[in-house]
Image (spheres, grey):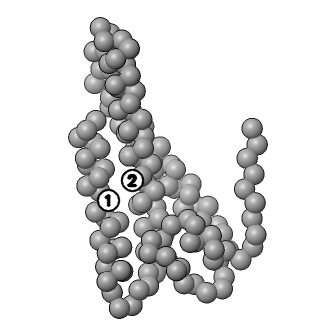
Amino acid sequence: MYYFLSLMDLCYTSVVPRLLRDLTAARKSISYNSCMTQLFTAHLLAGMEIFILVSMALDRYIAIIKPLHYMVIMDRKRCNVLIALAWGVGYWHSLALLLTVLSLPFCGPNQINHYLCDMKPLLKLVCKTFVLSVSW
């Protein structure tokens, strides 16, 4: 699990260099496609990292609570399923977020006054008002 977590942290290098380049450039702008790519990649990696951390917590919990059954419960197949689930959950989360953002009508000044292309700065550019309702 630590191996996959370190790989996830290494993958953040696909988001951070663009951010650093934009911070040091004279023209501090990012295209719409680059913004959507940055949004998708950042949320993909963050979602995968969170799920890997949850999997590691489950692994430690089983090791402490059922130490004699640990090798039977957490076999290689279960670890592979947890890693595949991390990739799947991260991908579907970021894809759903991206499709939601792409369906929003943007208008007005197309300038994001923020150093990273994320949800909160993007929602300030939306034309219509929207309400997020959750029903339980």
Q: Which mark is residue 25?
A: none
Residue 103 drawn at (x, y percent): 64, 67
Near mark 2 (Cα within 10 A), the count class, few <14, some 14-19 or many ≥20, is: many
Give 136 or 31, whichever is nearer the viewer: 136
Q: Residue at 63% x, 77% y: name it.
A: 125
Residue 114: tell me if it is visible: yes
Which of the 4 image quadrants contains residue 135?
A: top right
Compared with 21, 61 (above or below) is above
Helix, strand or loop at label 1? It is: helix
Residue 131 drawn at (x, y percent): 75, 60
For the N terminus, the image quarter is: top left
How many labels, in total? 2
Residue 18 drawn at (x, y percent): 33, 74
Q: Amino acid at mark 1?
A: Tyr
Gap in angstroms between the C-alphas marked 1 and 2 = 7 Å
Give 33 or 108, whichever is nearer the viewer: 108
Compared with 26, 10 (above or below) is above
Residue 84: tell me if it is visible: no
Q: Is residue 129 left or right of residue 82?
A: right
Q: Residue at 47% x, 65% y: name it.
A: 39
Q: Is residue 125 left or right of residue 80?
A: right
* Label 1 vs 2, first from the N-terminus: 1
Which of the 4 image quadrants contains residue 3?
A: top left
User: Disc 2 marks which residue?
Assistant: 45
Helix, strand or loop at label 2? It is: helix
User: Disc 1 marks which residue?
Assistant: 12
